[in-house]
Amino acid sequence: MSIPQVLVLLGLGVVAVLAIVARVRATERARANAAIASARETIARTERLATTGRLAAGIAHEVGNPLSAIASYAHVVRLRAGDAPALHEPLDALEREVARIDRIVRGLLDYARPRRATPDAVRVDRILDEVVRLVRDQGHLRRVDVTWDVEPHTGGVRADRHDLEQAFVNLVLNAVDAMAGVGTLVLRARTLAADALSVADPRRRDDATSATFVHAPSARATTWLARQAPSGRVLQVVVADSGPGVPPQHVERIFEPFFSTKVPGRGTGLGLALVAQTVESLGGTIWVQPAREGGAAFVLLLPLEMPLAGTD
């Protein structure tokens, strides 16, 4: 081999090395930027939570006491009304609205001052099964087709069982409410490596062979994945529905407390905020994207608890 050829090969090698170094630096810079963005979001969220806590304390005192008095007076009026039919309807409406205000106050307090969790290794597939049975027994799934796409023996996560179950109940009831009680509900869970995740949803068993479903990357998912080890195992859970979906301008606000796309009086705007709080307290993340069923797909990513043995 001639000297010029050696020099050419050396030059190509140097170029290749420089390209690799540049790529590594770009990756490290992206991870650093993601970590900074996550830290800023954490600080902002902490400040919002502190503000909400102060607001909750004031509401509990200023609204809770007179609300209890109103409920007591309504009960007294009902007892004295006896068989007066003309009073039954307004009293029912009064007690219903008092109960709704009480739920709002309690939800706000739960968001601002979450109870101390007692995490343990739990099996998510079993929790999802129990949630479906619970919601079905309550009659919410009478006209809903449930598609179960949960991997057998789906991995466990370290969580408070009650908190995680309540988060899934909120997501399922939110999906049923979005469909007005009629439609298709999809529950999917699988484990995979963090570096195997992409913005394209995998093909299901009942999809056409050529079907692909690509969504724009979620800022929440991108930030969370940047903090994970590429070879680390994660648990992905999807709760999707065939309802109207979430408008693009609302996908980043849907988890804010008191933000709701429902008509006034249909919700407190705290259900999804509590879900996000629970998921993030477990070291995970959640976002919403369009579902192939036509509605909304809420996607959760949670760190996998290994080994699986011994989980509930």
Image (spheres, rainbow, N blue to C red):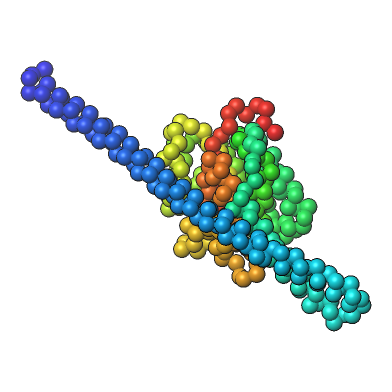
Q: How many marks?
A: 0
Q: Determine whether 254 is above or below 22 in the image.
A: below
Q: Quadrant of the N terminus?
A: top left
Q: At 44% across and 33% down in the image, what residue appears?
A: 229
- Name of the residue lying farthest toward the top: 1
The front one of 297 and 97 is 97
Q: Residue furthest right?
A: 83
Work out which quarter of the rendered image holds the C terminus and state it: top right
Q: Is residue 127 above or below residue 179?
A: above
Residue 192 picture location, percent across and down: 52, 36
Q: Nearer the viewer, residue 41 or 208?
A: 41
In the rendering, at what x and y percent does residue 138 appear? 77, 55
Question: Image check: 46 left or right of 6?
Answer: right
Q: Nearer the viewer, residue 122 or 199?
A: 122
Residue 7 appears in which quarter of the rendering? top left
Q: Can you give x and y, in whole percent of width and height, for residue 241 in the image?
A: 61, 56
Q: Is residue 60 left or right of residue 138?
A: left
Residue beneath the point at 76% across and 70% down:
70
Residue nearer the viewer, 200 or 92 = 92
Q: Name which residue lies at 89% across and 75% down.
A: 80
- Please indicate, yes or no, whether residue 124 appears anywhere in the rendered image: no
**Quadrant in the rendering for residue 102:** bottom right
In the rendered image, is residue 165 in sight?
Answer: yes
Q: Residue at x 46, y 47 (%)?
A: 42
Where residue 75 sits: x, y (%)? 83, 69
